[in-house]
Image (tube, grey):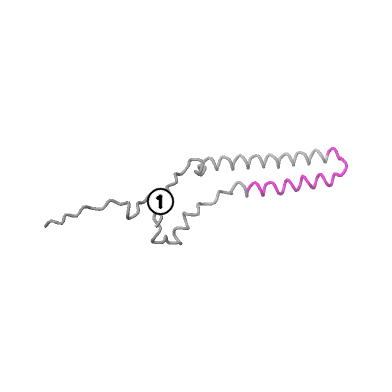
Amino acid sequence: MKRQAYQPILITDAARSQDDQLTSRQRRYVLMMGIRVACLIVGAVLVSVRPPLLWLWLSLCALGMVLIPWLAVLLANDRPPKERHRLGNRFQPRSRDEAPPMSLTAEERPHPVIDAEP
């Protein structure tokens, strides 16, 4: 039986805290809603100025005003996936010959001294 090499967990591999994740999602949401407001203002200005191809510009602004809030809500509610091992271990039992990390094999364990005298 081979012993698995101990591999330390690096801090760079750690997941971001929930507060950091929430803050970044809130910022992204506010930014996207700001873009939506900009589309609304640009649409109002275009109606008053009446540039060539007004229908194209207004349809692009309307598309931005409809799609951006939908995407903003989806991205604001998006969380990173849960770790695989949290649920995977419950449904897949560990094989008996697989040693847990940082465990000693039978050869490496200290053997108790047994006195042969009665």
| Most frequent secondary structure within the magenta stretch | helix
Q: Where the N terminus falls, by quadrant?
A: bottom left
| Identity of the residue furthest to the right in this view | 52
Mark 1: give few (<14), some (14-19) or many (20+) Cα within 10 Å. few
Quadrant assignment, res 30: top right
- Residue 72 relative to residue 8: left or right: right
Name the residue nearer the viewer: 107 or 66. 107
- Give the camera-side residue of 77 and 3: 3
Residue drawn at (46%, 54%) of the image? 86
- Residue 81 is situated, as x and y percent measured from the top left of the image, at 54, 51
Relative horizontal placement of residue 114, taking residue 57 as reference (left or right): left
The span shown in magenta is 48-73
The residue lying at 53 percent from left, 40 percent from top is 20
What is the secondary structure assignment of the residue under circle 1? loop
Question: Could you tell me residue 94's position as x and y percent?
Answer: 42, 60
Q: Reply yes or no: does residue 57 show up in magenta.
A: yes
Q: How many numbered marks appear?
A: 1
Q: Residue furthest left?
A: 118
Q: Position of residue 72 (x, y in %)?
A: 65, 46
Q: Amino acid at mark 1?
A: Pro
Q: Is residue 28 above or below residue 103?
A: above
- In the rendered image, residue 59, in percent from the top left (x then y), is placed at 80, 48
- Pointer 1 residue: 101
Q: Is residue 64 magenta?
A: yes
Image quarter of the C terminus: bottom left
Q: Residue at x 38, y 49 (%)?
A: 102
